[in-house]
Each structure stands twice: as C-alpha cells, then as structure tokens.
Image (tube, coloured by chain):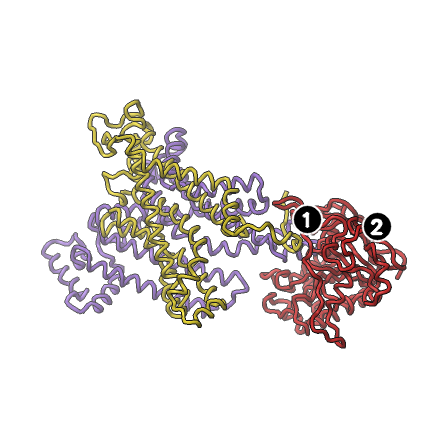
Chain colours: A yellow, B red, C purple
Amino acid sequence: MAVLDTASATGVLPAGAGALSPGRLAARRFLRHRLAVAGLVMLALFTAAAIIAPVVIGIDPNQVTPTAVRRPPGAEHLLGTDSAGRDVLARLFIGGRISLLVGLSAALVSTSIGLALGAVAGYFGRWVDGFISRIADVVLAFPSLIVIIVVAAFVGPSLPTLILSIGLFSWPTPFRIVRGLTMSLRGQDSLVAVGGLGAGPTRILRKHVVPVVVAPLTVVATLGVAQAILLEATVSFLGLGVPPPTASWGNMLNEAQSLTILESMPWLWLPPGIAIALTVLAVNFVGDGLRDAADPRQAR
Amino acid sequence: MTSAPMFRVDRLVTEFRVDGGIVPAVNGVSFDVYPGETVGIVGESGSGKTVTVMSALGLLPASGRVVAGHAYLDDRDLVALSERELQSVRGKDVGLVFQDPMTALNPVMTIGTQVAEGLRRHNQGMTRKAAADRAVELLAEVGIPNPRQRARQYPHEFSGGMRQRAMIAIAMANRPRLIIADEPTTALDVTIQAQILDLLRRVQQETGAALVMITHDLGVIAEMTQRVIVMYAGRIVETADVDTTFHHARHPYTRGLLQSLPRLYQPVDELPAIGGQPPNPQRLPSGCAYRPRCPLSRDREECHTRPELTTAAPGHQTACHFHTELAEVRV
Amino acid sequence: MTAFVIRRLLVSLVVLVGISMLLFVLLQLMPGDPAEMMVDPMSFSGDRAAAVALQRHRLGLDSPLPVQYARWTGQLLHGNFGYSYTSGRPVAEVMLERLGPTIWLMGTALVIALLVGIPLGILAAMHRNSAVDYTATVASLLAISLPSFFVALLGIYVFGLKLRWVPTAGMNSVGGGSFADFLHHLILPAAILGFALAGPYVRYARAGMLEVLGQDFLTTARSKGLTRRRVIGRHALHNALIPLVTVVAIQLPVLFAGAVVVERVFAWPGMGRLALDAVLARDYPILLGFVMAVAVLVLLCNLVADVAYAVIDPRIRL
C-alpha cells in the first residue's frame, strides 16, 4: 500500500539520545548495517587470501605447461588450467592481489589529488577555484574508460600507467567534497579567528579542515576503490590493462571471448568474474555502511 | 456560542513508530470547537499540538497512527473514515494553513494552479477557466495585488507574506467551516505577522468559519483567540477563555509561559524562563509530566500520580493537583 | 534564457577548441607524418608524392605551430580526418558507417533503462522497505557492481548458448538482412547495456522520489483533499523527475563507454569496436577521430543537461 511520508508532523521525535561519543555512535551504526559487516568480513578474507594463499599453494601462476592445456578442475589443479596450461586457482589469487593493489593505489592517488586540489580551491576561492573547478568539470564529464583506453593506446599498457590513469581521472569526486567542506568551514568564525591570530593556510588546512573532511572522504575513497577495481578489470579484459603474463581477473576473462571456451570451459571464466563481482559488491557494501555510519540522516 | 460544537476531539491517542520503539505523541486529548469561534492551542514544540490536528484529519506521516479516540466533525467521526472519505472532507469542510509557505507550496506549480486545484477537486462541474478565474478572485480577496498576473507566477517569485496569503487563499477556497492554522506567522517578519493575523480574522468574519490557531506565541493567542487550550507532553493541561488564561491561570505551566513574556511596564533584569527541557515523549516522567520542572510541585507525593482535568471554574479546566494554591496568587 | 544557452554554447566551444589543441599536440608526438596520414593511400605513387607535398603545404608544416594548428582545424572542418592506417579509407567515412549500429545499440539500451529503471526506483521509494524496494536496491547494487563484460558473457552463455534464444554475436546473420533478424541480434546486447545503465537510474530515481516524498508541499496537497493519485502523479512525480533529466543526460557518455565494451563482446560493428580495433592496431588517425567524436558527444550531453534543467525547472529561469 502506497504511503506518503510527510515531514511536517515530526516535531515529535525525541531529541538527544544516549551519551556516546560520535565515533562510537558511528561505529555502532556501521555494525548494525549487516551487509556492510558482511562486506568487511569478505574483504578481509579476500585480502588475506590474496596475500597468503599464493605462498601457501606454492604453484607458480605463470608456469606454462604445454602438456596440460585447458584441463578441467581436478586433483592436481583445483580450478583447472588455462590455454597456456597455467593453474587457474593460482592465477586467481595473484589476480586478486593485482586487482586489490590497483584498486587501492588508484583510489589513493585520486583521493590525494582531490584532497589537495579541493582544499586549495575551497580555501583560496575566486579564480583559483574557478579554474580548478572548470578542469574538474571537464574531467568528470569524460567517461574514464574511454580516456584510459586512449592513454593505453598511446603509451602502451602497463601496471603503473593503469594506476595513474585511473587515479588521474577519478579525482573530481573527492575534489568536490573537500572543496565544499573547505568552503563552508572557511566561512565559519572559528577559522576566521584562527586566521586572525596569524595561522597560515597550511596550518589551518591541516588542523581544521582535514579532521572534518576525513569521514566523507573515506566513504568516497572506498567507493572509489570499487570503481577502480571495475575499471581495471574492464581495461584488462580489453587487453589494454595489466600486461600478460601477469594474471589479473580482467585479463583472465579475456580468454572467454571464444565461444568454445565460453560454452564448455566454465572454470576458465566463471571464477574470475565471480571474484570481481563479489569483491566489488563487498567494497560497495562497506562504502554504503560507512556512509550511513558517518551521516545517518541521509535517506538510504 | 450556539449550543452544539462543530468539531469535537474525544480522547484522541496517537503514537509514532520509530527505530527505537513507540513514541506516544498525543495521550488522550479532548476538546470542542463551536461554530464561528477562535480557539488557540498553545504549547512548546513537541507538545503534540500539531499532531493532534493532523491525526484528526488523517494527515499523519506513515509512521504515525491514531490508536484510540474520535474526532467528530458535526456527526461524522473522521478517525473512522476511510482515506477516500477523508479526501472529500479535506479542503472542503476543513482548510489548513501551514507554517512555512516556502516549503508548503509546490515550487514548480504556479500559484494560480495550486489554488484552482482545490476548487476543481470539490466542485465537480467547474471548468478549468472558471476555476482559474475564481482563483484570481480569491487571490484578490486575500489582498494580493495584481492577482491575475500573480496567479501565473511561481512561489519563489512571491515574498514571504504574499506566499502566506496565497496559502490562506488555498485554505479558504471552498469556504470551509473550520480553518486550522498551524503556526501561520512563525516564519514571517513581525510586521507581516500582524497583516496575516488581520487577514485571518477578516476571512473568519466574512465566512463565519471557526478558526483553530496552533501556536507557541502567547501574543498571537492574546490577539486572536477567544478560548485557549494549553498542551504539554501530549496532554491538555489547562483550558479556559482567553482573559481567564492570562489573568487567572491555574496551572504552573501556563503561569510559567506567561511569566516568560516580557511586559512593557515591568522591566526586569532577567526574564524568568521555565527551567529544564521539554520531556522526551518516549520517557515521560511518572505521574505528572510537568513535575521535574514545576515550581509548585516541590516533588510532593500527589504529583507522582497523573492529574486529571478538573473544573476549576465554569469553562475553566486544569490538570494540576494544587491548582487551588494558584487561585490566590496573582499572575 | 537565450543568453544562457548562447553562453553555455560558447563555453562548450571553448572546451572543444581546447581539446582539439590537445589532440593537435598529440598528433605531433605520434610516430608518422601528419601529412602522410591525411592523404588517400590509394593515390598512385607518382601522384602520391605530389599529393603528400600538397598536403604538407596545406598543413603548413613548414610554418610555425599555431598556423599549423589553424590549417589542421581547417582540414577537419572540411571533413578530412585523415585516412585509416589499417583500411586506408577516410576516417570520417568509416566512423559514419559505424555510427548507425552504435546509435541503435545505445538508443535501445537507453529506452530499456528508462522504462525499467526509473519506474522501479520510484515504486521503491513509494513502498519503502517492501519487497519492491528490496528488489530494486539489490538489483541496482548488482547492476553497478557487476562488470558489464562479465554480465555480457553470462548473457551469451545463458541466452545464446544454452537456451539458444538469441544469436551470440554480430549484427546480422550471414546471408540474412531483414529487420527482424537485426532486432534478434540487437536484443541481448541492448538488454545487457540497459541493465547496466538502469542501476544508477534506479538509485537516483529512488533517492529523488524519497526526498520529494518528505516535502511539506505534499501535506498541503493532501490537505486540499486531493486524491492520492493526483498528489503522487501531479505533485510528487513532477518534482522528482526534474533532477532525473540531468542525470540521464550526464550518464550518456557513460552509456557510450559501456557500449564500447558490449560491442567488443558481441562483435557488434559499431564505433566502440572500431576504436578498440584501432587501439590494438595503433591506427592513430581513427583514434583521433574517435576522440573528437567522444568530445563532441560529451560536450553536447552536458549542454543539453544544463539547458534542459533550466527549461524544466521554473526556479532556474535565467
């Protein structure tokens, strides 16, 4: 039954709950978000697996065995072998390392750039802000996938190129957040007072802006990791990302473009695809949970 | 006053369902409104004054529910009506004026259309043109200059006072017999407040409607109303005619409200305010809800039982165990 | 209002010029002679040398850089985007050829996403925490988390190979050219692309509708005795759909990016596939043309978004 939720009668709800610190309240809200917790657990497992498992298994993911090409899952190779006779499971774990590495690094790059530029634009305002914001608008408007592909075409695919391109084209989102917050803070009396006392911009930014900005930035960064992982997978799938022979979930799926493999060798493409899906979902859950924890007033 | 009340609220109980449980908002409220009179409902935010009225008209948000009680408009119990039946009452027999006309008006619809909408809803045969013309007339009646031009404009092109006039036009479009104004002047400048109050009074006189003014502003009460209902923590704590309320209040809360009014000829160093905070509806004090803030109570035994409304004098009821002690004390 | 549109147009043009300058710089850095690139390789060698010399002159390669840039843009405006390294055909011609299939793909996906995504989001907001809301939230989360190429592969596997409902690749069957056959080939890639696009649509529609549902003017509307249908239809929806117009316009470049991937997986002969093949073959002329096309698309979408918003929302009459 459709119901209209109108706000005007809600002057009723109680003000002032318990007396916990905002940090603990936020943690509590996060933990109540079942999916977010599940996501966090899953990510922890994946990361642990990605780091430890390859060592434990002891199989070289790049070991080519021409005699054991495209074997289905069996005792010796738990997830079978690919077209070059390499162990799929081992490659899956290495791919996990790579994807997480790219995701985190790219998100780090974009968040750092966004933080720096956003603080500068928000603090100094006027033409500095106008200029940087314009550039941000243009960058934001272009679909990152296309740009990354073109860059890869000109420079040649490599891991650092990939991380940099993803990072360099994802900074507008954190930039906007930091800029907005800096601008609103700038107007507040506390900052004006501190500035009057002789504090320079760096000090103000560091001690007053950064603490406020941390929470929403973490949310944006987390969601940025998900974005980055997806981008890496897509670009690698198209053959322009992580260069072979290094395994990446994306380039493992590259093989699946042959109909025979697609139809009769699911072990070659289902595991990496599912791995990507689960990882990105988990990161998105955690991001959503963080967002709700940081600002419960936002309608889910 | 004619004999029968046209609007009767009878032991209304409303609660809200929230994340942490149930919030009781209205805890057994009863009052009457007679044809043509002006009644004021006064109380702090959260006292339940708005929720009472919204409950009666079925305008609660999804989380609210009327748990018990009745709200009679003439002979019909509005609480028992279906949503569809209520839709023919709202806007026709009862008109509402809300607090903030900027948010209460649809920002992407012209004022004229918003007025005409209500007209066409309750006047089946009315053509679009007829409704538009009548809307212009109504805008003129509420004192909006250049009404034909203004009708084609959007809310953001109006000033605050004019928006509220438009809201009043919407409320009275179908000549309702009851107009409920919820804090109609709170969001306005002081100078405009007086104009709007004048307008409301004029509308009431011309249409003969009863007017219920919900407000926290005693000045408005003094100026507009004939009878006053004081609410606290979802209950009525006192009701009397306006003179009695101001000069012979027999409830410590009412007294507290009155005392915090600045008086022109009695300068004081500090305005006495009522100590403490309004109670959390989910955790009301046991017994009398006002007890923790009440200077009269001194935490006496009786105050741990909830006081019922008792008659202090004809037409004057109060819910305080020690109201007689207040009879001797001048306000 | 017209002043606003003109102003936005000018800004877009400035950005376009900026991008073209960037591309011009890239052109200089690329291996190969720009003049060579822009001459029809089909001309005979004798003529060819003369043609290249002429082109060199046209591009003013012996003149200072800004002049070269001006001449190069002149060539572009004449339609000469160069000639493809791989096929030797004029870039403009090849791109135009591929434009149609891509537009069909994107257009159908857009329609699917609009018809499914937005109503779903709105219903989810209206029936909060119900089964519909739950489905919508989960579905949209999946749509934005699953890589589109993986969904495409799954789609081909299930619908193409196992169920054999649709063909697995290409735009037409061999020997067949009927419209029905074309649609048969179109439906799966368009659906997959539409699904990916619908994810954000559902989220934005839901959030927008939720925000509107919490507004006071809805209470006013109800207080007039308006029927629920009118309150939702005329007041709530109208307000909720306004910001969605911008969202749709802004998401169009993303749709194009998605189309690139889908075209690859389905071997759909569109612009995206063209670009990818060009990347792998280092066919720079095609790539340049492609980037220009994308730039125009992006700028157009943003322009439309801004103008549409100003037109639809009376609060922003400029």
Residue B35 appears in which quarter of the rendering? Answer: bottom right
Which residue is more in the foreground, C58 or B194? B194
Question: In the drawing, does residue C66 fall left or right of residue B49?
Answer: left
Identity of the residue drawn at 88% across and 62% down: B1
B197 to B289, vertically: above or below: below
Say whether marks 2 and 1 touch (CB < 8 Å). Answer: no
* Mark identifier at residue B244: none
Query: Which image quarter is the C terminus of chain B in?
Result: bottom right
Residue C138 shown left or right of residue C156 in the figure:
right
Residue extending furthest toward the left: C46
Label number found at residue B283: 1
Marks 2 and 1 sit apart, C-alpha to C-alpha, by 36 Å
The x and y percentages for residue C134 are 53, 40
- What is the crowding at mark 1: few (fewer than 14 residues within 10 Å), some, or many (at least 20)? few
| Pointer 2 residue | B75
Classify residue A169 by image quadrant.
bottom left
The picture places residue B44, in percent across and down from the top left corner, at 70, 59
Q: What element carries label 1?
A: helix
Q: Is residue A144 left or right of B197 when viewed as pictured?
A: left
Depicted C135 relative to depicted B146: above or below: above
Q: Please, what is the three-letter code of the amino acid marked with disc 1?
A: Arg
**Compared to C226, does A252 lie above or below?**
above
Same chain for the residues at labels 2 and 1, yes or no? yes
| Upstream in sequence: badge 2 or badge 1 | 2
Q: Which of A106 and A131 is in front in this view?
A: A106
Find residue B66 and report its horizontal and vertical position in percent: 73, 46
Q: Position of residue C155 (x, y in %)?
A: 39, 35
* Camera-nearest label, 2 or 1: 1
